Amino acid sequence: MQPTFGMIDDQVRRKKITMLDQIADVIDFRRIEKILLKAYKGGGRPPIPPIMLFKALLLESWYGLSDVEVALEIHDRRSFERFIGPEIRNYHLDDTTLVKFRNRLREKGVLDRVWAEVDKAMTARNLRVKKGVIIDSTIG
């Protein structure tokens, strides 16, 4: 994949290390990705990689966001984009995609399993995410 100007800019900018960067080092997302890919066998156009969608669900949970809010924040916050992967810029992520993804994981019986993998990794390192809420303070 050819990098975009934004990706090159990200490499040049000094990166503020966040909780998400630390969590990305703790959780073995390859294990979770293997589980997710089993639920995504089949034809059709190439989907947004399931691991990216699952990371969006993690952000929702940890930050108290809705599907609509997390989609907006992923495209607006560098730390969210880094956590999901800068390749997310190549896709149109919206709330409907997240709803369909979550439902598919439930139907395939893997949603609880991937959450358990996250919990196991966090517990093994004695880590806990304090959930918060992002408040938009836009002046109207």
Image (cartoon, rainbow, N blue to C red):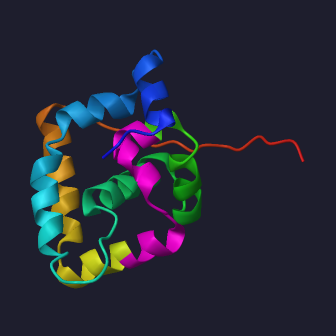
Residue 5 at least partly seen: yes
Which residue in the rendered view is the most extreme toward the right? Answer: 140
Left or right of 90 in this view: 67: right
Using the rendered view, name the quadrant where residue 115 is placed: bottom left
For residue 21, which quarter of the picture? top left
- Residue 78 lies, in percent from the top left, at 50, 35
Viewer-closest of 15 and 116: 15
User: What residue occupies the far front of the structure in this picture?
Assistant: 2
Q: From what the image shows, is residue 57 above or below residue 129?
A: below
| Residue 130 visible, this orientation | no
**Residue visible at 60% across and 43% down?**
134
Say whether residue 35 is left or right of residue 79. Answer: left
The residue at 18%/72% (across/down) is 110
Q: Seen in the image, is 13 located left or right of residue 17?
A: right
Q: Quadrant of residue 90?
A: bottom left
Q: Is residue 83 magenta?
A: yes
Q: Residue 16 magenta-drawn?
A: no
Q: Residue at x 40, y 23 (%)?
A: 11
Q: Magenta: predominant secondary structure element?
A: helix
> How many numbered circles are shown?
0
The stretch in magenta equals 81-100
* In-image side of 52 versus 96 (left or right): left
Image height of 42 relative to 95, above or below:
below
The residue closer to the viewer here, 137 or 49, is 49
Image vertical order of residue 57 relative to residue 103, above or below: above
Residue 103 to residue 50: above or below: below
**Which residue shows up at 41% across the image and 51% down it?**
88
